Image (cartoon, helix red, strand yellow):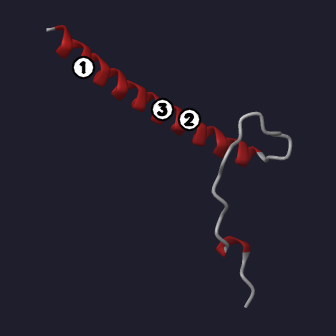
């Protein structure tokens, strides 16, 4: 029994900065936007944690 396309595992969506976008469908572009938005949020959260840690250390050593 042949594997139907819906049963095949999907490739993990990845995006390379500067990649040619002309071959991507609207759905693929939308997926990439969602991926990049979630990555931006993850980066912001990591930066906030590092900033808080640095501020706590600075406050500790100032006293």
Residue reaching furthest to the top: 62
Q: CA distance from mark 3 to mark 1?
A: 21 Å
Q: CA distance from mark 2 to mark 1?
A: 30 Å
Q: Where does the image place residue 22, in percent across and percent down from the top left?
A: 86, 41
Q: For mark 3, what is the residue? A: 43
Relative placement, left or right, of 22 versus 18 is right
Q: Nearer the viewer, mark 2 or mark 3?
A: 3
Quarter of the C terminus within the rendering = top left
Write the residue at 42% across / 26% down: 47
Residue reaching furthest to the left: 63
Q: Nearer the viewer, residue 51 or 22?
A: 51
Image height of 11 relative to 32, above or below: below
Write the residue at 85% across / 46% down: 23
Residue 57 - label = 1
Q: Nearer the viewer, residue 14 or 6?
A: 14
Relative placement, left or right, of 25 versus 13 is right
Write the residue at 65% across / 52% down: 13
Q: CA distance from mark 2 to mark 3?
A: 10 Å
Residue reaching furthest to the front: 61
Circle 1 — which element? helix
Residue 37 - label = 2
């Amino acid at each position: 029994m042949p594997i139907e396309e819906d049963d095949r595992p999907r490739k993990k969506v990845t995006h390379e900065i500067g990649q040619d976008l002309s071959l991507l469908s609207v759905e693929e572009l939308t997926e990439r936007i969602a991926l990049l938005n979630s990555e931006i949020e993850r980066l912001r959260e990591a930066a906030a944690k590092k900033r808080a840690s640095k501020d706590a250390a600075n406050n500790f050593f100032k006293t």
